[in-house]
Amino acid sequence: MTYAYLFKYIIIGDTGVGKSCLLLQFTDKRFQPVHDLTIGVEFGARMVNIDGKQIKLQIWDTAGQESFRSITRSYYRGAAGALLVYDITRRETFNHLTSWLEDARQHSSSNMVIMLIGNKSDLESRRDVKREEGEAFAREHGLIFMETSAKTACNVEEAFINTAKEIYRKIQQGLFDVHNEANGIKIGPQQCISTSVGSIASQRNSGDVESNSGCC
Amino acid sequence: MLTRVKSAVANFMGGIMAGSSGSEHGGGGCGGSDLPLRFPYGRPEFLGLSQDEVECSADHIARPILILKETRRLPWATGYAEVINAGKSTHNEDQASCEVLTVKKKAGAITSTPNRNSTKRRSSLPNGEGLQLKENSESEGVSCHYWSLFDGHAGSGAAVVASRLLQHHITEQLQDIVDILRNSAVLPPTCLGEEPENTPANSRTLTRAASLRGGVGAPGSPSTPPTRFFTEKKIPHECLVIGALESAFKEMDLQIERERSSYNISGGCTALIVICLLGKLYVANAGDSRAIIIRNGEIVPMSSEFTPETERQRLQYLAFMQPHLLGNEFTHLEFPRRVQRKELGKKMLYRDFNMTGWAYKTIEDDDLKFPLIYGEGKKARVMATIGVTRGLGDHDLKVHDSNIYIKPFLSSAPEVRVYDLSKYEHGADDVLVLATDGLWDVLANEEVAEAITQFLPNCDPDDPHRYTLAAQDLVMRARGVLKDRGWRISNDRLGSGDDISVYVIPLIHGNKLS
Ligand SMILES: Nc1nc2c(ncn2[C@@H]2O[C@H](COP(=O)(O)OP(=O)(O)O)[C@@H](O)[C@H]2O)c(=O)[nH]1
Ligand SMILES: [Mg+2]
């Protein structure tokens, strides 16, 4: 399956905020209430369509625990987008955002698009962080903001796609050097359609049929 | 290892974030074979990665450390972690596999004469031999734990093939001797199909006494069978296992050689494997990976490396005996540096296959040729081509721009070491660490032991992931973090830019076996 661009994302935030669930909802359209603790790095991938262009999102889901922080830090490099997630029912996960943001800013390329996500919006009754607080934090630090629910899938699609749109916009503005793969962006194989890339997960939901480009 | 070949491949493929699964087709600079792959490229089967995940893992910029998924378990709760190189090759050329093999006597296989000793007799042996039979009833076969690690070069083909097939060769070799092995009370028969002498394995003195009387006839006691030969070597059981492993390596290498006419099996690989059979660990190593046991904080080396430096004398002797293998371009002698033409007739230090020290010789024309072994440490090469002297594959490897084959100098024979698990009561933090040279190039045995002895006691002893987390910690320590001046580890030393793969195998499971 061919694509115009590949964007690499990283999902960060405290443990238990729903990072792995968000990824699973996005790639597999399902919610798994009991998700194993992420102790290393896990990957997901899916094709999306932005502006008529096929874009492959390659998503890295990281471990949030303090003890894995140094490993997680080493994965910011080469990411074009980051989803910084907190749990709207647990204020401490919101309080830790500054430290996550510091890490991200320090270890990523300066153009990385950061999407702030307040997850578990389905748990309105247990809300501990107001939407306005999330919005204010995002405004203050120049982030995009959304509240999502990995459980009901509300806004999950949008969170990933809006991040991609923002990256795409930056590419068009010439803010990203797409030839430097350290920026987390790769131009798709134009010359030659690769033979068998793409698992079922990445082909599903990919929207329209891929364009038939190239020589092979 | 094959710097020249490797950089050519890396340039051709463009390296970084490349993930097209088709990149091995059409050669990618390594042979240009049109033949199909024997197995598709991938990461170890036990990691259970999808094609997308494999693609993500090949990120030479962020170099993700892959570990066993939570839902997957290896035998003995073995830990595993790996990371790809920093860009020297598109693929991670390390491979691994791990499984529990069942060794059953093949139907119609050669049979040894049934053993007349009762189970009662066996289990009453003082050293506890024979007790293993409890868990393996004869009809079910003997279980054999297997861990393997391969470090490929000049392509991933050989390493992938070996990671899929070597275990079958081992099973096949063990099948022939499984009945003899489980009959631990009786030494293996020298010749199959004859009446066994029924000599208990632990009564050497009697045997020796009998052999001293040998030839004189008329044995002193009626229970001693007549001795047919003056001396007969007593071969212990474990030597048959060692022989089986050595044969399996050779068969694997021959299979690669045969199948390369119908498949594209690129490059070669080192091989380090461990089996646990009937209470003993057998570590077989061909190449420059390494195995160490860390027991109570102490290091027990379980392998040695085979490189142009460690095998210099073997290689020089071969070249001395068969000079045509050097294609008139190399000299088998070693000099401290390249000899210059203007030095002809002078005396220079040298050493030959028979020497570990140095002597002077008068320089002749032949000495001006490029040395068979050249370079120091990690840079030492055989015929300026390869830095490892044992392993599998490489049948088509030639000296650059020549018709000189390297393979005759390479050996597929492993060195096998045995570790008797029953001799020690192992704790939860006693482990066997297996790793490719990516780890050992930057971390000394002592540093690895220190890391393990720091890490494991801080994990919950019941955490099933503790050994995987320890493996991840080791890979992280060897990879380091990317700074302005490349990958750096502790004390600002250079981190490993190589593929790194690590097993951490807890030995506490060995306690249950005996
Ligand atoms: N109600 C609700 N629960 C969620 C949501 N997302 C995650 N969870 C739960 O939160 C817990 C942690 O989720 P997980 O994805 O493992 O968190 P991670 O550590 O950030 O990866 C799990 O028990 C999930 O079932 C959500 O949107 N709504
Ligand atoms: Mg998680």
Image (spheres, grey):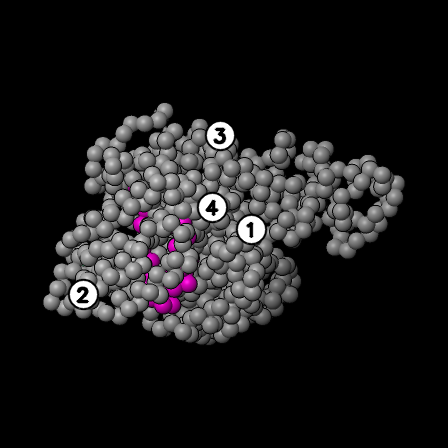
Amino acid type at mark 1: Gly
Look at the image and give the residue range highlighted in magenta. A56-79
Q: CA distance from mark 2 to mark 3?
A: 61 Å
Q: Secondary structure at mark 1?
A: loop
Q: Position of residue A173 (x, y in %)?
A: 35, 40
Tell which subunit mark 1 falls on. B
Of the two numbered discs 2 and 3 in the rendering, the one whose residue sits closer to the viewer: 2
Q: Which residue is mark 2?
A: A130
Q: Position of residue A182 (x, y in %)?
A: 43, 47
In this picture, residue B317 sits left or right of residue B363: left
Q: Which mark is residue B287?
A: 1
The quadrant the C terminus of chain B occupies is bottom left
Q: Earlier in the sequence, mark 4 or mark 3?
A: 3
- The residue carrying mark 4 is B93
Same chain for the residues under marks 2 and 3 in the image? no
Per the model, the C-alpha gap separating discs 3 and 1 is: 26 Å
Quarter of the image where one finds residue A140 = bottom left
Q: Earlier in the sequence, mark 3 or mark 1?
A: 3
Per the model, the C-alpha gap separating discs 4 and 1 is 14 Å
Q: Residue drawn 82% across and 37% down?
A: B341
Mark 4: amino acid:
Glu
Determine the secondary structure under disc 4.
loop
Locate residue A188 relative to residue A162 in the image: left or right: right
| Residue that numbered label 3 is attached to | B32
Identify the element where label 3 is drawn: loop
Residue B206 vertical position relative to residue A161 in the rendered view, above or below: below
Closer to viewer: mark 3 or mark 1: 3
